[in-house]
C-alpha cells in the first residue's frame, strides 16, 4: 500500500543517514516532498548541491537538467541520481546543442565584429537553467552565463555590461518578460526560429535587437491566459494574482506580481490572513501552498489541473527503489556530466552564482 511504501522510504532514509541527501523541486508531488531533506526552486537546488560536501550521493527529485546541474556543481566523488530517467523537460528539449551552435554561427556572422567603439561584445549568450549541460557549456565557452527565473534580471544586467545584445535560450517568455521589465521594447526582441535562415529575421533586425529570443516555451505555463485572470478578478474582487515568469508577457502584465517558485512561496507565506490569491504555476505547488496556509484562499488560475507531467514522473516507488539500491551499495540512474562539457558549463554556472546587479 501507499502507506507501507512511505514507511519503507522513511526507514531506508534513516538507515542511509546524512550520506544521502534527497533534494526536491517545489513542483514535486507531496508524497516526494515529505521525504526530501531540502526543497527549493532551481537556483536554491543548484546552491544546495554545493553545500553538502559530506554527502556521498544526492537523490535528485526533479528533472534531468537540474540533476545535470547538481552533478556539475557537486564534488567529483559525489553521485547525483535521478530516480526516473524519463523525467525530462519539454522546454529544455526545444533547444539542441546543434541548433544553438548553428544559430551562433549565423548570428555572429550577421553581426560581424562591430561594437560601435563601445568595447562591448556584439552578443552574449545567456541560457535559462532549463537547458542541457551542452548548452550551458556552450555559454561558458563563449563568454556567456546561466540564469534562473529568480535572477534573470541580474544576469541580463551582467550580460549588458559585457555585450551590446543578448541571445537568450530557450524560454522566450522568461527572456521577454525580463527584458520588458528592464525597459526594452518588444521591437528590439526578435524571435529566433531555429529552422529558418537567420532564425526568420533580417540581418538589419538582428543588428537592431537587444535581446534575441529563442522560440521555446513551457507547455505548463503557456496555458495561463489573461481571460483566466479577468475571470478570477470578476469572481473574487480584491484577489491578488501572482504568476511564474514562464507565462506569456500579457499574462505577466495582467498579474500583480511575477517571480520564481520561491518568490511565489514567499508571497503566500507573507500574505495577511484572509487574502485570496490566484496563482499561475504548477498545481502541486499551488495545492501545497494552500494546505500550508488554510487561513488564505489560494487557487490555480487554470481550472483544468495542470501538473508538469515530467516532474510527476518521480513516483514514490522510484524513490524507494533508488534508496534500496543505495542501501545495497549500488548507484543506479547516475547522471554524469564529464570532460569539457562539465568544465565549461561550470564556468557559466559559477558566473551566475557570482553575478550581482
Ligand atoms: P524555478 O524553480 O526556478 O522557479 O523554475 C520553475 C521551473 O520551471 C522548473 O522547471
Ligand atoms: Fe519544464 Fe515547464 Fe515542467 Fe518546468 S514546468 S520542468 S519548464 S515543462
Image (tube, rainbow, N blue to C red):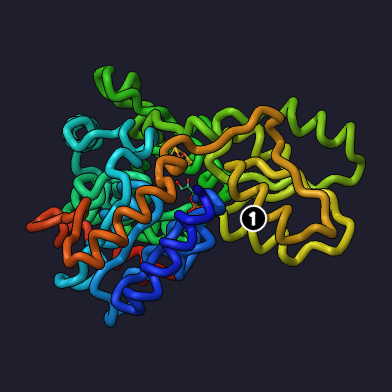
Q: How many marks on residues?
A: 1
Displayed quadrant of residue 169? top left
Is 339 in front, or is 147? 339
The correct choice, above or below, for 163 with respect to 168 in the image is below
Is 191 in front, or is 259? 259
Indicate yes or no: mark 1 CB to ligand 1 under 8 Å.
yes
Q: Is residue 127 visible?
A: yes
The correct choice, above or below, for 224 with respect to 345 in the image is above
Left or right relative to 13: residue 121: left
Question: Where ligand 2 lies, by image quadrant?
Answer: top left
Q: Is residue 152 visible?
A: no
**Residue in the image at 82% along x and 50% along y:** 297
* Percent of width and height locating residue 143: 23, 56
Displayed quadrant of residue 294? bottom right
**Residue in the image at 46% along x and 35% along y:** 309
Disc 1 target residue: 264
* Percent of width and height locating residue 273: 87, 62
Is 160 in front, or is 248? 248
Is 241 in front, or is 302? 302
Left or right relative to 277: residue 266: left
* Percent of width and height locating residue 303: 71, 30
Displayed quadrant of residue 14? bottom left
* Percent of width and height locating residue 89: 37, 38
Q: Residue furthest right?
A: 237
Mark 1 Cα-neighbour bin, 10 Å: few <14, some 14–19, many ≥20: many
Left or right relative to 153: residue 212: left
**Residue in the image at 31% along x and 53% along y:** 321
Amino acid at each position: 500500500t501507499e502507506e507501507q511504501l512511505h514507511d519503507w522510504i522513511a526507514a531506508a532514509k534513516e538507515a542511509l543517514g546524512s550520506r544521502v541527501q534527497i533534494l526536491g523541486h517545489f513542483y514535486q508531488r507531496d508524497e516526494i516532498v515529505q521525504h526530501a531533506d531540502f526543497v527549493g526552486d532551481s537556483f536554491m537546488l543548484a546552491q544546495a548541491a554545493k553545500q553538502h560536501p559530506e554527502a556521498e550521493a544526492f537523490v535528485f527529485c526533479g528533472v534531468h537538467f537540474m540533476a545535470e546541474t547538481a552533478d556539475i556543481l557537486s564534488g567529483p566523488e559525489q553521485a547525483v541520481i535521478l530516480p526516473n530517467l524519463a523525467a525530462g523537460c519539454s522546454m529544455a528539449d526545444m533547444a539542441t546543442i546543434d541548433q544553438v551552435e548553428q544559430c551562433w554561427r549565423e548570428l555572429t556572422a550577421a553581426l560581424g565584429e562591430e561594437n560601435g567603439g563601445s568595447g562591448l561584445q556584439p552578443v552574449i549568450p545567456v541560457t535559462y537553467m532549463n537547458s542541457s549541460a551542452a548548452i550551458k557549456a556552450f555559454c561558458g565557452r563563449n563568454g556567456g552565463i546561466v540564469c534562473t527565473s529568480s535572477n534573470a534580471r541580474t544576469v541580463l544586467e551582467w550580460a549588458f555590461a559585457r555585450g551590446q545584445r543578448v541571445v537568450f535560450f530557450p524560454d522566450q517568455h522568461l527572456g521577454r518578460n525580463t527584458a520588458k521589465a528592464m525597459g526594452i521594447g518588444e521591437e528590439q526582441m526578435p524571435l529566433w526560429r531555429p529552422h529558418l535562415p537567420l532564425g526568420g529575421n533580417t540581418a538589419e533586425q538582428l543588428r537592431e535587437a537587444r535581446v534575441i529570443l529563442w522560440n521555446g516555451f513551457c507547455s505548463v505555463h503557456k496555458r495561463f491566459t489573461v481571460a483566466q485572470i479577468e475571470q478570477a478578478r470578476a469572481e473574487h474582487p480584491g484577489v491578488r494574482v501572482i504568476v511564474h515568469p514562464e507565462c506569456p508577457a500579457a499574462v505577466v502584465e495582467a498579474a500583480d506580481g511575477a517571480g520564481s517558485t520561491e518568490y511565489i512561496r514567499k508571497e503566500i507565506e507573507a500574505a495577511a490572513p484572509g487574502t485570496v490569491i490566484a496563482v499561475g504555476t504548477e498545481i502541486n505547488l499551488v495545492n501545497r501552498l494552500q494546505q500550508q496556509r488554510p487561513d488564505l484562499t489560494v487557487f490555480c488560475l487554470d481550472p483544468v489541473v495542470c501538473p508538469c507531467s515530467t516532474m510527476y514522473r518521480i513516483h514514490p516507488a522510484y524513490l524507494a527503489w533508488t534508496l534500496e539500491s543505495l542501501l545495497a551499495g549500488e548507484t543506479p540512474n547516475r547522471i554524469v556530466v564529464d570532460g569539457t562539457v562539465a568544465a565549461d558549463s561550470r564556468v557559466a554556472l559559477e558566473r551566475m552564482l557570482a553575478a550581482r546587479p
